[in-house]
Amino acid sequence: TLTKDFISTDLPLVMPALGLEAEPIPLWWTSDFINSSPPGTAEKDEKWIVGEFNCSCVGISKCLPAYCKEDTPNACFNDIPKKDMLEVRKIGSLVGRKALAILAKGAAKDRSSRAMESLQAILGTVGKADNEALIEKLMTWKRS
């Protein structure tokens, strides 16, 4: 399917194509697909292009009643209909969990980097700065 192919084949190439290979894709984004095939093209032969990526203004349609604008300057979370609240909370919780996982991964990487620097400094004081096998054993021990 279009979505599955985009996620598994094309998406891993997007950030490197933008010169951001060391960065994760944005947490919350959308993409507009445009069918560029002539009318009558068989579905399996269709060619789709991405017309736009949007990362700066992605909305959750169920939250639109809480959007402040000229005619609703005091809109708030409580203006979301009760019938939509379950989905709003589900989406909010999912995005929150993903954000926390990204932050935790960054913190773990930072801690690991600081631990490696400390071990190298310690080994450097005894003339063993290039003993990578010992560093790896110590890091493995520290993770256990």
Image (spheres, rainbow, N blue to C red):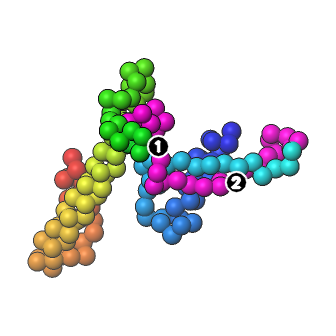
Task: From the top left corner, tell me how far across and down residue 55 is, in percent.
Answer: 48, 54
Task: From the top left corner, tell me how far across and down residue 15 is, in percent.
Answer: 52, 61
Going by the image, does 55 lie left or right of 86?
Answer: right
Q: Residue at x 28, y 49 (%)?
A: 104
Q: Residue at x 15, y 77 (%)?
A: 124
In the rendered view, tell whether residue 117 sits above or below residue 104: below
- The amino acid pointed to by label 1 is Gly
Q: Give the quadrant of residue 86.
A: top left
Task: From the top left corner, tell me how far across and down residue 74 is, in percent.
Answer: 32, 38
Closer to the observer: label 2 or label 1? 1
Q: Give the quadrant of residue 40.
A: top right
Q: Earlier in the sequence, mark 2 or mark 1?
A: 2
Callout count: 2
Quarter placement of the N terminus: top right
Going by the image, does 85 lie left or right of 100?
Answer: right
C-alpha gap between disc 2 and disc 1: 22 Å
Q: Which mark is residue 59?
A: 1
Q: Residue at x 56, y 59 (%)?
A: 14
Q: Is residue 29 magenta?
A: no
Q: Secondary structure at mark 2?
A: strand
Front residue (pair 58, 16): 58
For the question of whether residue 117 can be seen, the reply is yes
User: What is the magenta range?
Assistant: 40-67
Task: From the top left corner, tell me how far across and down residue 18 is, in percent.
Answer: 53, 67
Front residue (pair 84, 35): 84
In the rendered view, tell whether residue 22 sits above or below residue 31: below
Q: Name the residue carrying label 2.
A: 49
In the rendered view, tell whether residue 102 sits above or below residue 64: below
- Label 1: how many Cα within 10 Å (few below 14, some 14–19, many 20+): few
Going by the image, does 114 lie left or right of 2?
Answer: left
Whether pointer 2 and pointer 1 mark residues with C-beta atoms closer than 8 Å, the reply is no
